Image (cartoon, rainbow, N blue to C red):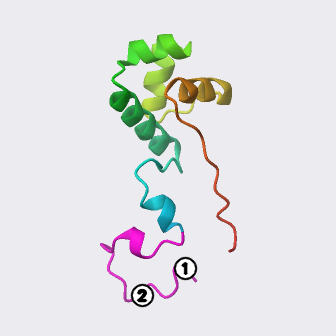
Amino acid sequence: MSPYGDTSDMSPYMDIVTVSPYDDIVADPTYLNARSVTRLGTAVTGLRKRRGYTQAELARKADVSRQWLVALENGRTEGLEVGRLMRLLETLDASLVIRDEGEQ
């Protein structure tokens, strides 16, 4: 059974905020979903652009290679190291949040 109850009559276009037990987080635009490496890359790209950095500028400030940043932004996992990711997030004034999605 879905954690959202009976979804058989639910439109696939329903607003997730109206059914999510995490609506406080989902509705907050400062939280970005990074459930996959692809989404993590999209989140990092969005943060970088909002902060006004080019890829080269952010890579230099975070002490990572531009190639590594490009790979991250494109959702490629080869060479993705947690230490580099944390340094990058710190440079962006962002953090990594882990949510327990086990049984409620």
Amino acid type assigned to the residue bearing label 2 in the image: Ser
Q: What element does badge 2 sit on?
A: loop
Q: Position of residue 51 (x, y in %)?
A: 37, 27
Taking the spot 54% from the left edge, 17% from the top edge, the residue there is 62
Q: Position of residue 46 (x, y in %)?
A: 37, 36
Extent of the magenta region: 1-21
Q: Give the residue drawn at x 45%, y 15%.
A: 66
Image check: 21 left or right of 16?
Answer: right
Q: Quick one: quadrant of the N terminus? A: bottom right
The one of 79 and 28 positioned closer to us in this rendering: 28
Please give left or right for residue 87 compared with residue 75 in the image: right
Residue 58 % position (x, y): 44, 18
Q: Quadrant of residue 39?
A: top left
| Residue at image point 34% right, 32% down | 50
How many labels sit on residues? Answer: 2
Quarter placement of the C terminus: bottom right
Asked if residue 80 can be seen in this view, the reply is no
Horizontal side of 1 relative to 92 (left or right) equals: right
At a point 48% along the width and 10% down the height, the residue shown is 60
The residue tagged 1 is 2
Q: Which callout, 2 or 1, points at the residue further toward the start of the chain?
A: 1
Callout 1 secondary element? loop
Label 1 crowd (10 A; few <14 / some 14-19 / many >=20): few
Q: Which mark is residue 101?
A: none
- Is 15 on the left or on the right of 98, as rendered? left
Query: Residue at label 2?
Result: 8
Q: Is residue 94 magenta?
A: no
Question: Amino acid under label 1?
Answer: Ser
Tell me which corner region of the image, top left, top right, bottom left or bottom right, holds residue 49.
Answer: top left
Judge whether residue 18 is colored magenta: yes
